[in-house]
Image (spheres, rainbow, N blue to C red):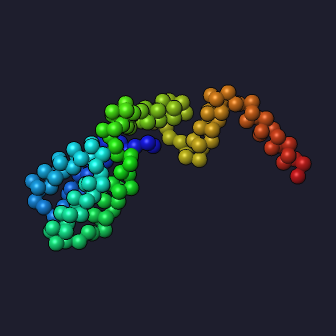
Amino acid sequence: MINMKYYHAVEHLKELSELLPLSKPERNSQFELWKNWLWEGLANSIVRKFEQLIREAKSTLSEDMETALQYFKKHHDRMQYKQFKKRKLLFGSGLVESAIRRVINLGFKEPSTFWYKENLNNMLVLRCTFLSGRWHNLMNAIQLGIKRARTI
């Protein structure tokens, strides 16, 4: 995926702000500021500010804090939302969720039914092969494999 979904990142940002050793109004204020920074693509600035606030509180980073910060460090390049919007790139989850619903749910199963992952993967291969016009190639490969298996 080219980028991280903004609202998913905001959820992580809220969790990060809740870890701050500040009063609730101060945490909320910091969260609102960081949402703007996130939109601007400044995930690294959020990390630096969080670490600065922890130092100012004469505290140390807990394991939860490190984990929360790691998300922003790891995905900084995928969080350039303002640039994505400027370049008219999609960065929401709706497109992916719609594709899953249309390709998998409507193409492979009835309402309220479920697939075993192993079976679904095989069905996806068959469906993609058929839709790409390569069904005959697959059938020829299967027949060749059967013939080879008989000679061994």
Q: Quadrant of residue 45?
A: bottom left
Residue 17 in view: yes
In the rendered image, the quadrant that contains the N terminus is top left
- Image coordinates for residue 97, horizontal then vertical, percent: 42, 36
User: Taking 104 as reference, is 26 left or right?
Assistant: left
Q: Residue at x 38, y 48 (%)?
A: 77
User: Taking 36 as reference, is 69 left or right?
Assistant: right
- Image coordinates for residue 42, horizontal then vertical, percent: 28, 49
Check the image and report above or below for 59 versus 113: below
- Image coordinates for residue 117, horizontal then vertical, percent: 55, 46
The foreground one among 147 and 29 is 29
- Image coordinates for residue 116, horizontal then vertical, percent: 55, 46
Q: Residue at x 84, y 48 (%)?
A: 149
Outermost residue, right side: 151
The foreground one among 18 and 151 is 18
Q: Residue at x 34, y 43 (%)?
A: 80
